[in-house]
Image (cartoon, helix red, strand yellow):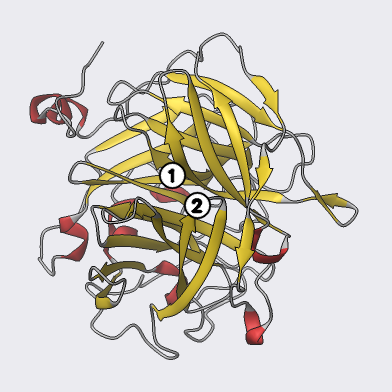
Amino acid sequence: MLKAVGSKFHPLLLGLALCSPLPSHVLADDKAVTVAPDATITVSGHFAGKDGDTAEDLSGIGCVKIASSGDLRCLIVNDENRTGQLATLSDGQMVVGPEIELIGKKEAKGAVGSPPQSFSCAGGKKKFKDLDGEAVAAAGAGVFYVAGSHGCSRNDDEYRDSSFLLVRVTLDGEGRAVEILPSYRLFEALSASTLKDYLTRSLKREDGLNIEGLAVVGDDLLVGLRAPSVDGNAVVLSVPADMLFTAAAETVKPSREWRLPLGPNTGIRDMATLSDGSLLILAGPTLEQDDIPYAVFRVALPDGSTDKLAVLDDVASGSGRAKAEAVTVLEQSEDQLEILVLFDGLADGGPRKYRIPLH
């Protein structure tokens, strides 16, 4: 079995993975328990949704610990705005902070690289609009990455340049944005992967590629896909983060690809890193399949062995269920995880805390 070296992957082992995906691993025996929320987190303030309404479509969260207080500073996005919004997690409460403009109304100023030159979205090309933010990852004390869906619009199958951006946000110690740098080069990396034929296919099909998870491991950005599920395997790609923001002629290519046996019609809804260097995955349906549960998996890196930790009890939203869309780690001990999950379909994400046993 391959072993991680420090917080990075050994370069020789990464070299072995270039040009070919890691084969699928056998999923460990399903010992997963079903867990209900341990607590509902109080939200102070409101996250901004479309046209100033309270957001009910939060879709991504990334958090870092504030050294002076031990609180978590988080950047949160939804899939309807051009902005992200800061929040502080402390003592079972989420305090909503200011918005940060991630892209402009008509263009991504100073963007690295160029938008896709061709696409298959049947609804045609529409004007630059929302980021369609689906995932956030924190790297160090003040750097966050935010990814658009990199797919056609789900309802109208339309193409927009703005949905194919990755944005790097750098904050100072007070949480003020000191640099915001957008890039189109993640699409370039996806185009150089084994999944290039799934790009810009309709999201009403099960094989239309779209991003919903991000995580940072060492110098690499890990990208998790909600779809496609390839033969019952969800896909994670690793890309050198700095390359995505370098205006170089060299083509950006994934350094590694994992096929994770999460189950049929099951994709990645969000990701986070654990203290031991493994990857936490929040999984759910690739489309809107009601028979696919939301579940939590742990993935050992770099080998990719996958362990199903828990199935999440459904959380009601109207006459249906809310969609578990975003996850961050609150605490980790030897035998237990405390995680925070945000939901699409609930005001301000309806944040819930869960205790997940580690076996």
Judge whether residue 332 can be spotted in this image. Answer: yes
Residue 228 visible, this orientation: no
Tell me where residue 253 appears, x and y as whole percent. Answer: 22, 48
Picture coordinates of residue 250 (x, y %)?
11, 59
- Badge 2 local density, few (<14 within 10 Å), some, or many (20+)? many
User: Which residue type does callout 1 highlight?
Assistant: Gly
Q: Which mark is residue 297?
A: none
The vertical placement of 81 against 137, above or below, is below
Residue 271, quarter of picture:
top left
- State how far apart marks 1 and 2 are (Cα): 6 Å
Residue at the image position 46 percent from the left and 26 percent from the top: 298
- Identify the residue at image location x=52%, y=51%: 91
Q: Quadrant of residue 259?
A: top left
Q: Quadrant of residue 257?
A: top left
* Relative horizontal placement of residue 231, taking residue 40 as reference (left or right): left
Could you tell me the amino acid type at mark 2?
Answer: Glu
Up-down: is 22 above or below 60?
A: above
Which residue: 56% across, 50% down? 92
Task: Name the residue that disc number 2 marks.
Answer: 212
Farthest residue, direction bottom: 106
287 lies left or right of 22: right
Name which of mark 1 and mark 2 comes first in the sequence: 2
Residue ranking furthest to the right: 319
Looking at the picture, does residue 336 appear above or below residue 292?
above
* Helix, strand or loop at mark 1: strand
Residue 63 is situated, as x and y percent measured from the top left of the image, at: 39, 54
Residue in the foreground of this view, choosing between 196 and 258? 258
Q: Is residue 58 above or below residue 104?
A: above
The image shows residue 109 at horizontal and vertical percentages of 29, 86
The residue carrying mark 1 is 224
